[in-house]
Image (cartoon, helix red, strand yellow):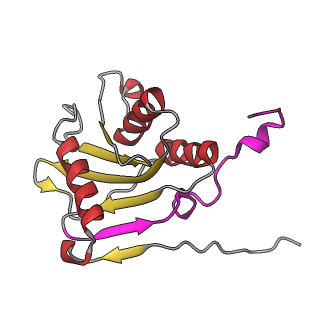
Amino acid sequence: MIKTKKITISYREAESPGELDTETRDMIEAARKSALNAYAPYSRFRVGAAIKLESGRIICGTNVENAAFPSGICAERSALSYAVANYKDDRPVVIAIAAITDAGITEEPVTPCGNCRQVIAEEESRNGKNIRIILSGKDRTLITESVADLLPLQFRKNYLKVSLP
């Protein structure tokens, strides 16, 4: 017999910046500043990601579009790739994501695409630590303590059935 199961996710929500601690506000500000540097001439949807590493270092990334659409990269993957390439032993502990359109900061918090969720999941797996995710909109902010709340049925390396580090 087929069973129906439910998945519950958990997140915190702040309805104004005044409800957030200083670190969270600083991470959102870094993501917003990074979004201003995005190259998004086609969608005009500029996304910034700011990653805080264990050392306290902040790494930023932006989306970079390309006329051959699949060739672009998202802000989250841009920032994570930079962090791994340059600070492979300095683990990400927080990532903040913000988006800006021609009208300004998006009203609602923007979530990572599926590819970015999977890349964040791999980074959590690689480091054996959760990454707190901050999704910011104009006023409202959502915070999860792990990508599992955004991607509960993620693909995992043990599915490959090969010896992996």
Q: What is the residue that sits farthest to the front in this orientation?
A: 55
Count of residue discs: 0
Q: Position of residue 29 (x, y in %)?
A: 20, 54
Q: Residue at x 46, y 66 (%)?
A: 144
The answer to whether 70 is drawn above or below residue 155 in the figure is: above
- The reply to whether the magenta stretch includes residue 153 is yes
Q: Residue furthest right?
A: 1
Q: Decide which of 27, 5 is in the foreground and name it.
A: 27
Residue 108 visible to an observer of this rendering: no
On the rendered structure, is 96 left or right of 152? left
Find residue 57 and report its image quarter: top left
Q: Which residues are magenta?
A: 139-164
For the question of whether residue 13 can be seen, the reply is yes
Q: Is residue 153 left or right of residue 96?
A: right
Residue at the location (25% across, 78% down)?
Answer: 19
Picture quarter with the N terminus: bottom right
Q: Residue at x 66, y 75 (%)?
A: 6
Q: Is residue 1 magenta?
A: no
Q: Position of residue 157 (x, y in %)?
A: 72, 41
Image coords of residue 93 (percent x, y):
46, 53
